[in-house]
């Protein structure tokens, strides 16, 4: 199935700024509210279901014998056939 990007933005922010964005998403998820994203002329509003799939990924990109770029990705996914197939997750 082809992927359609509905919204994308990338910029350098302080850890406190990133935490504020993540806190807003967390608060909206907890309260059952929609999540609205906007930057420039882009915007999208999404309504995650009660039990979306939550993916956490840590990656290192670059050559195996030299320093690379590290990333942590958090992703919520859902569709009509979503199920609970993961184990326990801890984030510290």
Image (cartoon, rainbow, N blue to C red):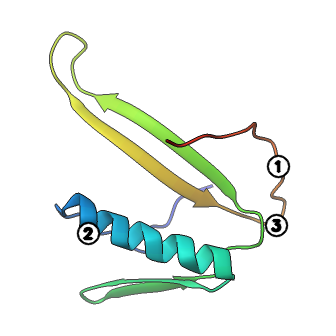
Please give the residue where the numbered disc 2 appears in the rendered image. 17
Q: Position of residue 22 (x, y in %)?
A: 43, 67
Q: Tell me if I can see residue 6 in this picture.
A: no
Name the secondary structure under disc 3.
Answer: loop
Residue 35 has which mark? none
Q: Residue at x 66, y 82 (%)?
A: 31
Looking at the image, is mark 1 or mark 3 nearer the viewer?
1
Q: Position of residue 91 (x, y in %)?
A: 53, 43
Work out how far the residue at label 1 is from the one at label 3, CA to CA, in angstroms: 13 Å
Quarter occupied by the N terminus = bottom right
Contact (Cβ within 8 Å) of mark 1 with mark 2: no
Q: Earlier in the sequence, mark 2 or mark 3?
A: 2
Q: Residue at x 57, y 80 (%)?
A: 28
**Depicted 92 relative to depicted 18: above or below:** above
How packed is label 1: few (under 14 Cα within 10 Å), some, or many (20 or more)? few
Name the secondary structure under disc 1.
Answer: loop
- Left or right of residue 87, residue 60 in this image: left
Please give the residue where the numbered disc 1 appears in the rendered image. 84
How packed is label 3: few (under 14 Cα within 10 Å), some, or many (20 or more)? few
Q: Residue at x 40, y 86 (%)?
A: 43
Residue 80 has which mark? 3
Residue in the foreground of this view, choosing between 13 and 8: 13
């Amino acid at each position: 199935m082809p992927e359609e990007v509905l919204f994308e933005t990338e910029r350098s922010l302080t850890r406190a700024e990133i935490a504020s964005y993540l806190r807003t998403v967390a608060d909206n998820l907890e309260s059952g509210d929609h999540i609205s994203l906007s930057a420039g002329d882009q915007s999208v509003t999404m309504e995650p279901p009660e039990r979306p799939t939550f993916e956490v990924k840590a990656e290192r990109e670059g050559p195996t014998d030299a320093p690379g770029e590290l990333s942590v990705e958090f992703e919520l996914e859902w569709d009509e056939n979503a199920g609970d197939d993961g184990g326990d997750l801890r984030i510290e």
